[in-house]
Every structure is written in structure tokens, then in C-alpha cells.
Image: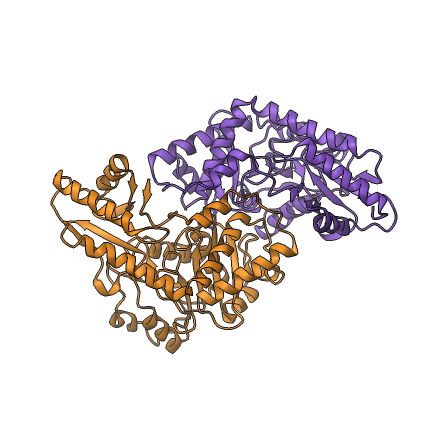
Chain colours: A orange, B purple
Amino acid sequence: MINFTVGPVQMDEETRKLGMEQIPYFRTPEFSAIMKENEKLLCNFFDAPVDSRVVFMTGSGTASMEGGIMNFFTPKDKVLVVNGGSFGARFVELCRIHEIPFTEIKLEYGQPLTKEKLYEYKDSGYTGMILQLCETSTGVLYDMNMVGDFCKENGCFLFVDAVSGFLADKLSMKNMHINAAITGSQKALALPPSMSFTVMDKEAQNRCLTNTVNSMYFNYADYLKNGERGQTPFTPAVGTLLQLHEKLKRVEANGGINAMNKAAAERAEYFRSKIKDLPLKMFTGKDCTSNCVTALTPTNPGINAHRIFEIIKDEYGIWICPNGGDMAEKIFRVGHIGSITNEEIDKLVDVFKDLVKRNLL
Amino acid sequence: MINFTVGPVQMDEETRKLGMEQIPYFRTPEFSAIMKENEKLLCNFFDAPVDSRVVFMTGSGTASMEGGIMNFFTPKDKVLVVNGGSFGARFVELCRIHEIPFTEIKLEYGQPLTKEKLYEYKDSGYTGMILQLCETSTGVLYDMNMVGDFCKENGCFLFVDAVSGFLADKLSMKNMHINAAITGSQKALALPPSMSFTVMDKEAQNRCLTNTVNSMYFNYADYLKNGERGQTPFTPAVGTLLQLHEKLKRVEANGGINAMNKAAAERAEYFRSKIKDLPLKMFTGKDCTSNCVTALTPTNPGINAHRIFEIIKDEYGIWICPNGGDMAEKIFRVGHIGSITNEEIDKLVDVFKDLVKRNLL
């Protein structure tokens, strides 16, 4: 099978080889040294301010979304939440569960957050803002420079879910005034799913240390304390963390974050240029589309997007990424993260062409 | 390195080979079928009542300990918590965090829960009981038949942390009147750390469905609902779940749970018989010791248990398992779970003998 989903994605040979190794005992100085290096490299790649730290969470991206809501905000906050898809909607639900006062900026799915829309909320006492870098369900990339400037001007703590965007799209915590940002192991890092990572500036750390968190597993103060000696409070996915280390070192040796961004952009562009003449319409505008994924709407009448996913899986041995909920029948997605070659993209494009011939697309 | 810790432990060749494979997309009927089989086999191996279900949690064992406290109990309960080591203490802390009224049965570390002690609490309005099967920090195995009978007589909901005990020690949810029990991927299942599993009878499921849980990640009602179609609400450690499937099928084909229990008992006995004449004292009594791990106290004066761990790691290439906190300098542990051969045990025993010669033990 060739995998064009947005996670788990295709892993590199180096990562796969490590997957076969025995997993070492981890309460050792040897493992701590690796974890300290993981922390340093992640901070570098997020372009995080000096003295930033990382919480290594064993759990899906949602675990770190929820952990962030619990540790960074309290009922005394008043936050703006951008809901432009199912992951934005998840933040809305998390604020509801944890009783964080919020205003939802509901966007039409596939549409960007405009400056006009955002600045309706200026000077209105907001203390925080929460959104995705890339809304994975639609492929929209938000203008994080604009959002960061707004947050700086308005004194908002900015918490960004970059789970799928990190490495694929440009991200600078410093320049975008981001206080905390998340990524996950199975996205552009192309590791097995199991871990998510939150990079935090000093302000985010202070919030973790002073807020009361009614949870043991999500008590970030405890993670920060254990992290000082390169450890986690509970047994992490040790194998994934060793694969993370190898991957981060390899990224560093191969041009760093800029090279990764560039490769993702080129891969996305290669795919998009190849499907121009096919009966598929990009669901997002040209200026607000992530390098991570392309969401597509079949333009011929009567074509069911979820059925396309099934046919391509069952008859051609390729996974594209179906959508859920309201979007299931209208949209499918093609991911551009992980170890994907242009030859594999060509194969997928040939499949689309074959489906057109068969009157199935 | 040879690994005698209690997790992560040495994995089988079959498990390691799967670790090298690409990880499939999982929102498919194919993966759902595997998950349904995982659920059925885990229920079988826990000897769970008909209609039992499993929650597959991406997280350490502690995640499922906390999830259980949040989903099974409310401030209207009154629970007994056995604290005989650091994992018992963790349950105490979790009840405190989640405001579950509780009485702590504090045991001297290394000592069993006696019938006399337990029955002090009979007919006292307790609605629940929480304890380990094996207290991993000391190797004590609790008499779960006695505990189960007590819970049945007293109408207590019984929640058991069998994270390290499962597969190594005898466990029958039916016979021991256990409502819910946990295990973790990196213990006797010998998979990579990343997942923990809670097997629940009907009563436990009903509690999940009726209690209000202020969490998205720990909302078991959502896991049960998604589980009906063989899925999880959030991206799980898909690779580990495929390794789980292969392992459970292999256990089934090789004599099932009884054969696993027997092998663990024989391995523990083999090790214990070999160290009889060494200056090491078993920390637990003969009748209350788990097959999972042996906790040992050096008997010669001035010997620091943590130093022994360090020397064996650095000079002999073997991990034994250090203790934390108060026990760090007095106790170390030798695990008997995972893929360990008698030849490897012989090597460790030779190391102990060498340390005696060197006056280091």
C-alpha cells in the first residue's frame, strides 16, 4: 500500500530500522541525554525563544490539545477560538469541557481567517487565542503572522496546534509571537503515532507552574520538573522518542527546518500541478493552503468522495485520506507529509486518470 | 544490553519484525477487524464476563489508572485504596485529585494485605475498592481471591491495576469478581510502551456511560462508542496495536494464558533458586510474591542497591531495575517478564557472583 493520508504517514528507512531494535531501559543518564537533545532540537525547529521547554506527552495530538487547554488557561481567561474545521471544533469543545470562557470564530470550512474578521475582536479584553496552524480537516493554512501581531497588540496568550503543520509549513514561535505550540509524532516527523510534543515559552511555563490542574496525567508542572533531568513522570513511548532523536539529528544535518519546509512545498506543488486538468477542485484558496495536505472536491455530478477513497484503497492499493462528518461525501484529502516520492505521486495521479476513464471520477 | 527491568522489557523477534513495517492507515474496516479481535482476545485472557469491553488508551499505565478513577467513581462513592508501594500511593493521589472519598489501607512495603486487616473495613458502606494485582515497586502479589470475595460480600466495585501482573500472575475477572482491570503494552505483553488497556464488565461500562467525566481524552463513553465499530476516538499507537494482535494470536496458539502464567512462574522460580546462596534477601514473603518481579535487599552492610544497578549497567551491560524514593538505596528489582532466557538469567547470576568476589555485593 502507498500511504497519502495525513497520519500515520510513510516512515523513512532509518526510522523503520530503529523500530526493530530492542527498547532500552529509560531511567538512565544515557536516555536523559537523548531527551535533553530532543528538547533542544525541537525548540530550535519551532524557532522558540531562549529558555523554552518541551512537554513530551504519551498520547495523540488531542492529548496535548487538551493538556494545553488545562494548563495554560483558567476560568478567569477569555479566549478566542478559531473553528474552521473538525480540529478547530475540538478546541471549542475542550474550552466548554474545562469551563474556559471563549468566543468562537466560526469560519466557513475551507476559508481563511481574514484580517477584517479577526480585528472585529480587538481591544475587547481577550486574554488568549487558540487555533490550528493548518486545519488538517480542510488543508487551510492560517496567516499566523497576522494572528501573532493581533495577539501581541491585544495581550493575548497564543496557543497553536501545529500538529500537522510543523515541518511542512513555516512556523516561528518568535516571529509569530506564539507562546505554546504542539506537534505529533505521526505527522511530518513521520514517526509511529504515540507521542505529541508541546513547545512552550517562559510565559507558557509560568502558567503551567501557577495554574491548578485537576489531573495527574496532564499536570505539566510535573513534566517540566521531570524534564529538568531529561525524564518524564510516566513511562513514555521510548522507542518513538529514540526515533525522534534520530530524525531530528538527520533534519539538522540536512539543511534543517528550511529544507524540510521547502521539500514539503515542492511536493505539494508537484502534486497540485499534476492534477490541474482533472475533475477535482481544490477546496481551499491558493493563498491559504497548507503544504501538508490538499483537500479536493470531485467536480463531476454524483461523485461520492468517500467512495473514491474506498475504490482507490481496494482496487489500487493506495490510501488517500477520507473526511468525516458533513464533509465525508464531498471531500477527500491527499497528504504530502512523510516519506513520499514523486514516483508515488505519479502513480496516484495515474489512478485518478484511470478513474476518469472508468467514469468513476 | 540484557534487560531485566519491569518495562519496557525484551520483545520477541515477531514483535520486533513488525516494528520495522510501515504503519497502515487505520480508519478502515481492515483495521477495525483487527481491533475487534484484540478486544475479544484481551477479554478472554482476562477471563472477563460475557459482554465485557476494552478501552484502548494511548498513554502509559498511569493514564488508564487515572481514566479509571475518573470514569468508574464519583464523589458519591466511598472507596478503599490499598497503598503498599509507589503504585498504590499513586491511586491514593488520584482519588485526592478527583475528590473521590476514600480510606487508605497503608501497608508496610513488601507486606501482603491480610484477611484480618481487610475485614476491619467490612459492612462499613464502602462502594469500591482499588488496588494493584502486583505492586510493581515491591513485587508483592495481593490475594485477589480474598479481595474479590470481600468486594462481592460488601457490594464493592473492584478496580484492579494489573499493569505488570497480567499474563505473569493468575487473573480471572470472573472468579475474582473484578469489574475493571488494566494492563500496559510494555509489561508481560512485551510490546513497545505507548498503550494501556482497560477490560470492563457491564457494570464498569454502565458507570462510564452514566458518570459525567470532565475530559475529552479520558471520556470512556466515547471510547466505548467508537469501539463498537473497532475504532478509537483519537489516533492510537497503531503499530503497537498491530503488534498486540500478533502477540495475542501467538499466545492463543501456544497454550493461552495458562501457558504464559506457567512460563512466568518457572522463570521466576529458576532465578530465585539460583540466588539462594547469595547475600541477597527477598523483600517479599514466599506466599505473596509476584511472578513478574523479584525485589531484593543486599544483606551485607554498606551495600547501596542503586549503586549495584549502576555498576551492573555500566560494567556488565545488563539493566536490572532500580527503585525510587525511600527504597532507592535498599532495594533493587529483577524482572521476569518479556523475552528472557535461562541463559540470560545465568549471566545475571554470574554477575552477582562476580560482584561478591569483588566485595561490591
Please state the horizontal and vertical placement of residue B92, each as a whole percent of the image.
65, 47
Please indicate whether residue A197 sits to the left or right of residue B322 in the image: left
Please state the horizontal and vertical placement of residue A281, each as a whole percent of the image.
17, 53
Please indicate whether residue B4 sits to the left or right of residue B358 in the image: left
Residue at image x 43%, y 57%? A183
Q: Quadrant of the N terminus of chain A?
A: top left
Residue at image x 55%, y 25%? B47
Q: Quadrant of the C terminus of chain A?
A: top left
The residue most toward the right is B301
Q: Decide: is B277 above or below A255.
A: above
Please state the horizontal and vertical placement of residue A179, each as a whole percent of the image.
45, 69
Examine the rendering and report whether any part of residue B111 can be seen: no
Residue at image x 61%, y 57%? A32
Near-viewer residue (A301 or B359): B359
Please state the horizontal and vertical placement of residue A19, each as a whole percent of the image.
49, 44
Near-viewer residue (B232 or B173): B232
Examine the rendering and report whether any part of residue A113 can be seen: yes
Near-viewer residue (A112 or A229): A229
Examine the image and state in which quarter residue A293 appears.
bottom left
